């Protein structure tokens, strides 16, 4: 009997200790950005962090530490199975139910204050503890975010002619531009990475007259705080004959919004995390180049990089322009709507009734404006959808305008606008085919009649 009492008392003392040890071993909390934020988060932008937990008890309490001089807490969100509450920057996560829980407990959203610029800040989860066992804690989890460090950078450079080497990047300051021997003038147009926080001292566009000697063009980017960053472009004549166009005319995917611009070579798109592959369609502006890219890419990782390469060999010199698409899997898109149609589509004063179920639509070249484009207006069926128009410039009878409607979940639908000359050509082709078939049938019928007459004549000859 004494032995049983001793074992009972021992178990009574050990169970809480074992519970604490199990909790200490199994508790984990992670602070994960919902997306890969760049190093240049700007004032006014919102960032969000997921809190990932593993609980073997019913609650865990923590302090979410952030610099209130940099951020303003604008909201929290709980997910199924958990309740996330906060008092100031002190958070409590409660597990709903009796079973152990693990996964994404909630999201914390912060907004960078408008007066913030050029500093580094840390977002941290600290003093994680079990309310029932205050001696059980976990190590701090930190995420470092740079605020405004890239204010005095260029985003891209556009050339009126020539090719640039190396490929433009805001982190590279010196470039060589090659132009043909007969080029007398060139225009460089620069675009700021953050136009609200910097300016270009020389102006965003420079046109220079070229001489036989190398010509240098400089752009000086100055942030609002006064820091300067210079880009140098050395222009050489006679290196190319003639200038080669290595740009794309179209860049389209079946998922993800691409706001395509031929001079922009870096893109980021977001797709549902359940998507297993992505389809791309690209077309070069010039027929005299080699276009290389995978039409279908497997999405096996959280981030997949796809390259579209436009290249040309000229005078034994290999030239290439590379468009890069970074594809991010985003679980938040999985449950969003997939409406990607237009409710209405118009251009100019055209007498046209839009049918949202027709993917190919014809327009009259007489409706093209003096600027060589259609004055297109549209209304998406869903307010959550985005619309991108490609190819609406310098319109001719061979042009194709592509209207890409992207649903909230990233799924795309493409409408094509073609000149009605193609419709006429198509109708004419059909008529010619019909006439051809009729002539063939008539010919076969005539041969059959001749065959029958010949047979009868042969029979009559035998009788005689």
Image (spheres, rainbow, N blue to C red):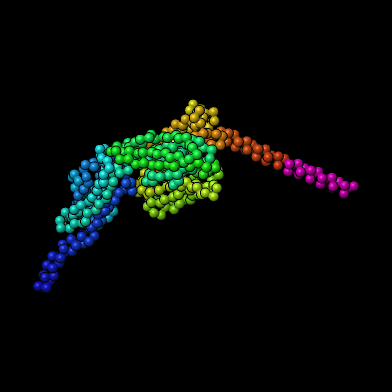
Query: Can residue 129 be seen from the camera position used here?
Result: yes
| Outermost residue, left side | 2
Q: Per the image, is 331 magenta?
A: no
What's drawn in magenta, residue-wise? 443-464
Q: Residue at x 68, y 40 (%)?
A: 436
Q: Residue 404 falls in which quadrant of the image?
A: top left
Residue 305 x/y as whole percent: 41, 50
| Outermost residue, top side | 349
Q: Per the image, is 457 magenta?
A: yes
Q: Residue at x 84, y 47 (%)?
A: 458
Q: Nearer the viewer, residue 308 or 456?
A: 308
Q: Main secondary structure of the magenta part?
A: helix
Q: Residue at x 36, y 36 (%)?
A: 200
Q: Residue at x 50, y 47 (%)?
A: 319
- Judged left or right of residue 114, residue 216 is right
- Judged left or right of residue 205, residue 16 is left
Q: Residue 9 falls in which quadrant of the image?
A: bottom left
Residue 398 x/y as whole percent: 56, 37
Q: Residue 202 falls in which quadrant of the image?
A: top left
Residue 382 x/y as whole percent: 39, 37
């Amino acid at each position: 009997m004494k032995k049983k009492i001793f074992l009972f008392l021992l178990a009574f003392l050990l169970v809480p200790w074992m519970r604490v040890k199990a909790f200490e071993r199994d508790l984990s909390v992670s602070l994960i950005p919902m997306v890969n934020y760049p190093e240049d988060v700007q004032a006014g932008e919102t960032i969000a962090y997921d809190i990932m937990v593993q609980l073997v008890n019913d609650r865990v309490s923590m302090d979410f530490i952030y610099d209130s001089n940099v951020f303003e807490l604008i909201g929290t969100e709980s997910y199924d199975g958990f309740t996330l509450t906060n008092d100031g920057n002190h958070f409590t996560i409660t597990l709903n139910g009796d079973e152990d829980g693990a996964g994404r407990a909630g999201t914390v959203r912060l907004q960078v204050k408008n007066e913030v610029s050029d500093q580094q800040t840390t977002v941290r989860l600290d003093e994680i503890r079990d309310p029932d066992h205050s001696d059980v804690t976990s190590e701090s989890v930190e995420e470092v975010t740079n605020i405004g460090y890239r204010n005095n950078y260029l985003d891209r450079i556009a050339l009126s002619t020539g090719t640039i080497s190396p490929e433009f990047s805001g982190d590279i300051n010196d470039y060589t531009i090659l132009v043909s021997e007969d080029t007398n003038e060139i225009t460089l147009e620069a675009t700021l990475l953050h136009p609200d926080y910097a300016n270009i001292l020389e102006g965003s566009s420079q046109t220079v007259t070229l001489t036989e000697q190398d010509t240098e063009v400089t752009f000086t980017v100055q942030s609002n705080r006064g820091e300067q960053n210079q880009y140098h472009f050395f222009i050489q004549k006679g290196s190319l004959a003639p200038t080669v166009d290595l740009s794309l005319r179209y860049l389209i995917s079946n998922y993800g919004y691409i706001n395509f611009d031929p001079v922009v070579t870096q893109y980021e798109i977001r797709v549902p995390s359940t998507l297993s592959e992505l389809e791309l369609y690209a077309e070069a502006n010039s027929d005299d180049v080699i276009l290389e890219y995978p039409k279908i890419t497997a999405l096996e990782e959280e981030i997949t990089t796809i390259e579209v390469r436009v290249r040309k060999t000229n005078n034994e010199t290999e030239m290439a322009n590379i468009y890069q698409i970074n594809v991010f899997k985003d679980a938040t898109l999985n449950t969003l709507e997939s409406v990607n149609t237009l409710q209405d589509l118009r251009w100019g004063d055209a007498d046209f009734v839009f049918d949202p179920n027709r993917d190919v639509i014809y327009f009259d070249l007489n409706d093209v404006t003096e600027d060589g484009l259609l004055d297109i207006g549209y209304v998406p069926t869903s307010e959550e959808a985005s619309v991108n128009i490609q190819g609406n410039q310098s319109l001719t009878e061979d042009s194709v305008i592509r209207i890409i409607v992207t649903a909230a979940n990233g799924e795309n639908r493409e409408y094509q606008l073609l000149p009605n000359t193609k419709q006429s050509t198509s109708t004419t082709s059909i008529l010619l085919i019909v006439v051809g078939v009729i002539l063939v049938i008539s010919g076969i019928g005539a041969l059959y009649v001749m065959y029958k007459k010949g047979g009868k004549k042969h029979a009559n000859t035998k009788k005689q």
